Amino acid sequence: MKPNRLLLQGHLKKLRREDYAYRTISVLIISLLLLVLGTLIIDVLRDGLVRFNWTFLSSFPSRKPEQAGILAALGGSIYLIMLTASISTPIGVGAALYLEEYSSKNRFTKLIELNIANLAGVPSIIYGLLGLEIFARMMRFDRSLLAGACTMSLLILPIIIIASREAIQSVPSSIREASYALGANKMETIIHHIIPCALPGILTGNILAISRAMGETAPLIAMGALTYVAFVPDGLFSPFTVLPIQIFNWISRPQASFHVNAATGILVLLLLLLTINSVAIWIRARYQVKK
């Protein structure tokens, strides 16, 4: 018995050492990443705060860097994200509900699930080329806000579907059984019980997806979004530009003043992203409390 106890104690000590080493390495890696991120943010703040004022936010782009503003790109980003969320969220959540609550587990369903998982890893430039061919040319949306929103919806749909399915799967089966026992049909059970319980997870997936869409540039450039727009979009078929494209346009200029504008544009993009995420997190927290 004693040799076995000594062997067990030695094994436990080895496991503790491995666990300590793993935690130490993890903390070091996270600290290094946070240090790099903090350095980049400090550098952007140092360069961009000089031009961060109301004039910059309310002015249109200009060939003179001191007079250039970001109003057209800011308005285009807000309209694009709102339209993208309006298109992708109902389709993504509906697809997740169908796969989890209605579809039978057969080869066709497995094929759909496999394709969704594969689409989540496709490079974003491929979605841009797809949007250029389908929405801009075949459906004749041209370089419009609607074409851009449909393209970005294709990009984030796999993320929304996968996150929504995970949230729906986490709903206990006892909730479904109790609803059916009280006389509710399947649709009533989904609307009044499953969706409210899964809503925090669904919102989390939407937050991640919209955050990715807000920072993407390659799909919009591939489908022909404009780099210089001196107006805010006034309709679904209006030409547009977005913050990442405007920042890319400024950073590619040789003048140092345009680089300052690009840093200020990055600050605006970060603030817009944090604002949208904060609102979504607040809504998610409210539903978690109700749940």
Image (cartoon, grey):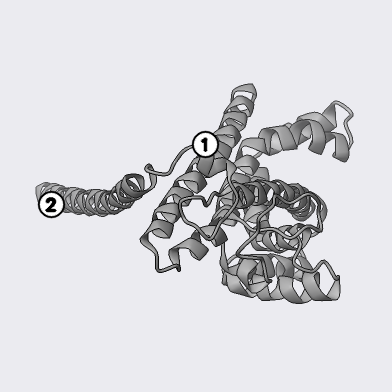
Front residue of 272/8: it is 272
Q: Dot 2: what SS?
A: helix
* Left or right of residue 89: residue 254: left
Query: Which residue is at the front of the view, 73 or 96?
Result: 73
Which residue is nearer to you in this view: 221 or 168? 221
* Total labels drawn: 2
Image marks 1 and 2: residues in contact by CB distance under 8 Å: no
Rendered image: mark on residue 10: 2
- Give the foreground label among 1 and 2: 1
Q: Is residue 283 above or below residue 32?
A: above
| Residue plotted at (39% across, 53% down) | 260
Q: From the top left corner, tell me how far across and down residue 161 is, in percent.
A: 68, 54
Which type of secondary structure does the marked residue at label 1 adopt?
helix
Q: Nearer the viewer, residue 33 or 239?
A: 239
Tell me what residue is drawn at x 28 percent, y 54 percent: 36
Amino acid type assigned to the residue bearing label 1 in the image: Trp
Where residue 53 appears, x then y in whole percent? Answer: 47, 38
Q: Is residue 228 left or right of residue 67?
A: right
Q: How many neighbours does mark 2 have within 10 angstroms: few (below 14), some (14-19), or many (20 or more)?
A: few
Which is more N-terminal, label 2 or label 1? 2
User: Whole-Å distance between the Cαs marked 1 and 2?
Assistant: 66 Å
**Residue 247, image x, y percentages:** 50, 58
- Residue placed furthest toward the top: 290
Residue type, label 2: Gly
Image quarter of residue 108: bottom right
Mark carried by residue 54? 1
Quadrant of image for the C terminus = top right
Q: Residue at left 73%, top 74%?
A: 132
Q: Give the side of residue 154 with respect to residue 215, left or right.
A: right
The quadrant holding residue 290 is top right
Q: Is residue 264 visible?
A: yes
